Image: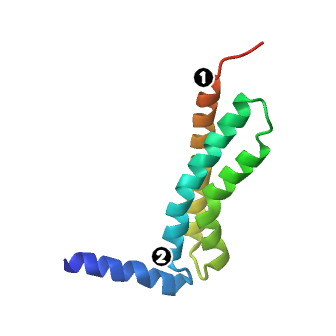
Amino acid sequence: MELIETTYNWFLSLGDQYGVDPIIFGVIYVGAIPLFTISVAWLMKNYRQKKSIVMPVMSASICFVSAYLYLIIAGENVPWWVYGFLITMLLYGGWSTIKKVKKQVSKVPNEI
């Protein structure tokens, strides 16, 4: 039990050290997940109906990076390696998402 309490206190102390509230970061991160999923579903619906996918792509993109934007905007004295890690995560996540969307798009029957 002491290990959990020590870890929890360490986690919260990171917020003071870097000027970011870990609870707010977590709420943004977890809260964006359903919004991201809805945006991808909206994207697929628009694609199938041959409507513009610009707004759903923008919505999904904003949801995808929202927690990290909070860290970049509110963070102070954040080590350079954190930014490198974030960029790597965002690139991988973007690549993975594009791959999944392309797979879903390929399942849509071609109507001539």
Q: Is residue 94 visible?
A: no
The residue sitting at 68% across, 40% down in the picture is: 43
Asked whether, in this view, residue 80 is left or right of residue 61, the answer is left
The residue sitting at 54% across, 53% down in the picture is: 34
**Local SS, label 1:** loop
Quick one: quadrant of the C terminus?
top right
Quick one: quadrant of the N terminus?
bottom left
The residue sitting at 53% across, 62% down in the picture is: 31
Kind of residue sitting beneath label 2? Ile
- On the image, the x and y values in percent for residue 109 come to 66, 18
The residue sitting at 59% across, 42% down in the picture is: 97
Query: What residue did someone put label 2 on?
Result: 23
Image disc number at residue 107: 1
Disc 2 versus disc 1: distance between alpha carbons? Answer: 39 Å
Front in this rendered view, residue 53 or 12: 53
2 versus 60 height, above or below: below
- On the image, the x and y values in percent for residue 70 come to 62, 71
**Local SS, label 2:** helix
Figure coloring: rainbow
Asked whether, in this view, residue 56 is left or right of residue 20, the answer is right
